[in-house]
Image (cartoon, rainbow, N blue to C red):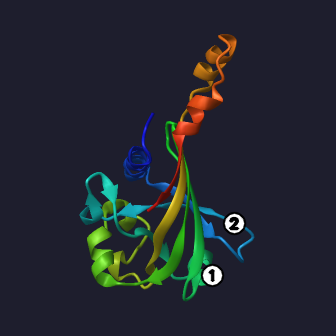
Amino acid sequence: MPSDTEIKEKFWKALKSDMTLFLGLAEGDDGHARPMTAQLDDECFRDNQYEGPIWFFTSRSSELYQQIGSGGRAMAHFASKGHDIWATVHGNLSQSTDRVTIDRLWNRFVAAWYEGGKDDPEVALIRLDPENAEIWIDASSMVAGIKMLMGIDPKQDYKDKVAHVTL
């Protein structure tokens, strides 16, 4: 029976590995979310927990970047590659063109998207300041099926596999 802290640790480890969130505005964008590659700052990991913003490289002309303007409420969705962790994250979005952050997070995968490199006039960042999340970890349906055959209620096990956490 994992604790909320352990579930949160599993989420951060999976996000650091898989890196893709569906990101959108919680209001005003008809709930439209886009797949975005999350950049986590290694300096923000402490005791298997992440304490910092989640960054996304984008272009200044992208629709989401334009819609954020001076800020907006975010809703991000995550599913790990192994489909063993899912999450919905809420927080605030903001625009950034901070060169120090761009330099720190820049990598060859990001570079492939910008012809002018870090100096490309379209390079921008979206900053997600996560506030809270609901995180689910896999409660295997096969195990649940076997338990049902044995007359055991599988819902009791599952209730311990979801956490409402502050990020």
Q: In the image, 122: left or right of 86?
A: left
Q: Which residue is mark 1?
A: 67
Kind of residue at badge 1: Gln
Kind of residue at badge 2: His
Q: Nearer the viewer, residue 94 or 161?
A: 161
Where the C terminus falls, by quadrant? bottom left
x, y percent for residue 32:
69, 66
x, y percent for residue 26:
65, 71
Q: Nearer the viewer, residue 67 or 159?
A: 159
Is residue 96 in sight in this rendering? yes
Where the N terminus falls, by quadrant? top left
Q: Residue at x 49, y 41 (%)?
A: 81
Q: Nearer the viewer, residue 155 or 99?
A: 155
Query: Mark 1 and mark 2: span between their CA atoms?
Result: 12 Å
x, y percent for residue 51:
34, 65
SS of the residue under disc 1: helix
x, y percent for residue 92:
52, 75
Upstream in sequence: badge 1 or badge 2: 2
Based on the displayed image, in which of its 4 quarters is residue 43 positioned?
A: bottom left
Q: Which residue is mark 2?
A: 32
Question: Which numbered marker is on residue 131?
Answer: none
